Amino acid sequence: MTTGTKPAGTTAKLRDSTSVFLVGNIEDVMRWYEKLGFTSEYYPPGFCILRRDAVSIFFQQHDGYVRPDDPGARARQAWSIYIETDDVQSLFDEFSQVPDVKIVRPPSPQVYGQIEFDVMDLNGYRLVFAQPSR
């Protein structure tokens, strides 16, 4: 990896972002996400990277951690992560066949030009899968 100083008047560009979720059950998380087609890489003592295609999600384990209930977030169906795909209907069909996958919103067109569906993971994180509708 090359590091260095940018020429005067330029700024560093951000290139990517990865969500990091805190969990108390990392082994269960890895098994659950593998059902969705993710591969897992475990790094003891409590970190894993889950990948599918160009998407990565990081998980950190804190023994005994239980995600706190947030009634406001639950009421407004707040998202935890937003993942774009090239075929939202095929992905919905794929996930619909997987046992223990809780789809909490079917494919729905949005006024901002996306078609989305939501999956709730085993720790209560809401995953949104989306595709442009135009």
Image (cartoon, rainbow, N blue to C red):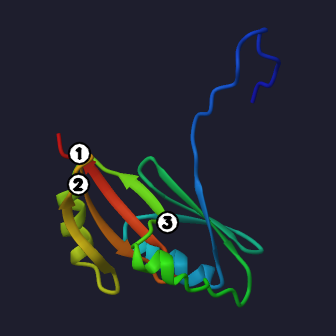
Q: Is residue 78 above or below residue 55?
A: below
Where residue 43 sits in the image (x, y, percent)?
71, 66
Instruction: Judge the density around disc 1: few (<14), some (14-19), many (≥20) Cα neighbours within 10 Å.
Output: few
Q: Residue 113 carries which label?
A: 1
- Where on the picture, by quarter, is residue 100? bottom left
Where residue 3 sits in the image (x, y, percent)?
80, 25
Single out the mark in the foreground, 3 or 1.
1
Q: Which residue is drawn at 22% across and 66% down?
A: 92
Along the line of sight, the residue nearer the viewer: 1 or 107: 107
Residue 93 visible (yes or no): yes
Q: Is residue 48 left or right of residue 131?
A: right
Q: Write down the residue under mark 3.
A: 80
SS label for mark 3: loop
Q: In this view, does 74 lie above or below 3?
A: below
Residue type of the residue flagged with mark 1: Gly
Q: Would you say the residues marked 2 and 3 are in contact, meaning their CB atoms lie under 8 Å apart?
A: no
Residue type of the residue flagged with mark 2: Gln
List the single residue furthest toward the bottom. 64
Q: Write down the residue under mark 2.
A: 110
Q: Which residue is drawn at 27% across and 72% down?
A: 95
- Where on the picture, by quarter, is residue 106? bottom left
Decide which of tag 3 and tag 1 comes sooner along the chain: 3
Q: Which mark is residue 40?
A: none
